[in-house]
Image (tube, rainbow, N blue to C red):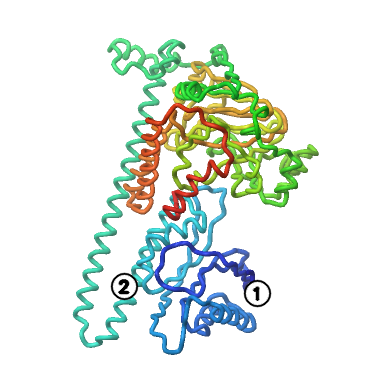
Amino acid sequence: MHLRWFAAAAVVCITSSAIEYLDSRQWLIQTHIQVQGVDGISRRQELRVPCCADIQVEGDKFCESSDLLPHDCIMFKAYLAGLQQGNQACRCHAHSTTHVPQQLKTLPFNVHHADTARSPTYFQLSVFEGDTLSLPTRIPAVCRQFNLDVDSCSMFSASFTQQVIDADVEHAMAQLLTLSPHATYPLDVLRHVLAHVQTMYADEQRRHRHVSEAYRTLRHQLQREKDRQIQTTTACATADQVKSPIPDPTPSTDAASSCTATIHSGPALAIDDTLPSMKPSLPIPRVDIRTLSYSDYLALAKGSVPLILTHSPRLPQSPGIPPWSLDVLNATCGTRSVVLKRRNPTKPSWAGIEAVARADLRQFLHDIQHKLEPWPASLSSLYLHDMSVIEFCPDLLQSFVIPKLFVRDALQTTCTKNTKYWPSLFVGDVGTSSGLHTDWGATAAWMGLLHGRKRWRIAPPSARPFVYERVGDGDGKFDADLMAPNTSAFPLLRHVQVFEGVLEAGEIMFIPADSPHQVVNLDLSIAVAMNFVDAANIDAHMDHVRHQLMEAAGQGHSAIAGQYEQVLASLEATSRQWQVQDESEPAAMAYADYKRPSVEACQAKGTWIV
């Protein structure tokens, strides 16, 4: 149901949307109000009205906080009265002894996200007496409701928890004082005890924060030292050392001294155009997916060998290659809004791309098909890159089938934001590209190309230091460019041998975990991709989760750390199961069947914020 009021200072839209968290109290309504002020900023205001509350009083509170005009306020209170009359769960009567929770305050929040491409999120929450009991489930629900990232959720959690507890304690003390106005000594004792507990809690949070910061600093220092050692030793060695990029940790004193002298002498390291370029590329193996066994695939995946899988369209339902042509995308999703990106090597963003525009898909497809002028004159040169299909246009998934080699996915036994993100859609004209990167959390990936051609260059995980990975600037970012290698600026590139290949329409690319890769579109291309965790990379992914768990615990974010513990437990159980699983060949699987374990995990474990 949608009701809309036009007021002097705000446009208010009420939409019925359940707020999912555990609360034993009964409510007439729990929803969010969309309020757009004269400043142009859209805010979402929480509306909670307890069962058996005085509708006139509750309506007046909302009208006052939202600056509604008198006749708009009358309409709103009539709406609440209608809800109360039609609500069978409340069962209110004149002599009811049901306790009606009292609203204590409202709390505004202005959240700035770690992803600078996202606009700030403005919302306002209500605080009722007794809300402290619902904090463990309410905080994750709010983070999910407003799609807060982990860092933003952590900051919100700390602020909201403190303010709710303070409001509840202050109200409880006032109630006790009303019951016994002359006996203030017990209240003073209680107040002192609570103040002491709050001080201890703040000190503990501060200690955790300091430990976490020290841990991160030490980790970055160790990584920088490791990279410096690798670069120093490699500069003194032969190109054959790329097969074993980690240097001998116990070099002779003479060799070490000689190397150090060479490195620090200055002129000996002068780089000019006579230096050799990168080693010749290796072709990415092309394998018929119809005949490749799962055991052979796992052996190649564990060896970090990328693959181009052919002949999928000749299999039933064309696994990994859904029938999403430009016409189908336009007809099914043309009116949906998409975020469009472009390559910007000067930006320190993942994959070297930045979000620059939001538009309807129909307009974007029109511009790239008609080869209009590049951005900002039109959208033709922009890139629809890694757009979540389930969030953007879930109707497409009815025709989506997972290839047999990728159906055993440990991520589907968990319930996280990343699990729910894939598959993702890629649409870009000739020349659009992404920079060198690795994928999140030591996950592997596959991409099915539906239309066009893509050139790929993929480096082995052992070459990450040689392609100039950024330390302390997030995971999976690099300074080197494999499509236009500059060995003068990045001399270690001459020791790197990459896999290279052109992915054709109807083929599937497999990208091993932790492998830096870079892609450029040779034609107008449409592709779909998924990240996953199987037996080849589950140990590496669990290491990533353990690291996230340590950082969350070190910062005192117990709710987030607890969820990482559950994710890790699910992954460990899956790993044990795979160790004793029979060697039967998996079969291609419809998307709904593939996602069923994850859906069941979400239903069993509630709202997730990691």
Q: Local crowd at mark 2 within 10 Å, few (<14), some, or many (≥20)?
A: some
Residue 305, percent from left and from top = 51, 21
Report the residue at 56% width, 51% height from top: 118
Examine the rendered structure and indicate whether residue 112 appears above or below residue 10: above
x, y percent for residue 563: 38, 49
Q: Is 591 placed left or right of 543 in the picture?
A: right
Q: What element carries label 2?
A: helix
The answer to whether 418 appears left or right of 337 in the picture is left
- Answer with mark 2 or mark 1, whichever residue precedes in sequence: 1
Mark 1, other Cα within 10 Å: few <14 / some 14–19 / many ≥20: some
**Disc 2 designates what residue?**
169
Q: Is residue 413 left or right of residue 519?
A: left
Q: Residue 514 carries which label?
A: none
Q: Quadrant of residue 551?
A: top left
Q: Residue at x 26, y 57 (%)?
A: 203
The amino acid pointed to by label 1 is Trp
Task: Return the mark for residue 5.
Answer: 1
Judging depth in this view, the residue of 67 and 324 nearest the camera is: 324
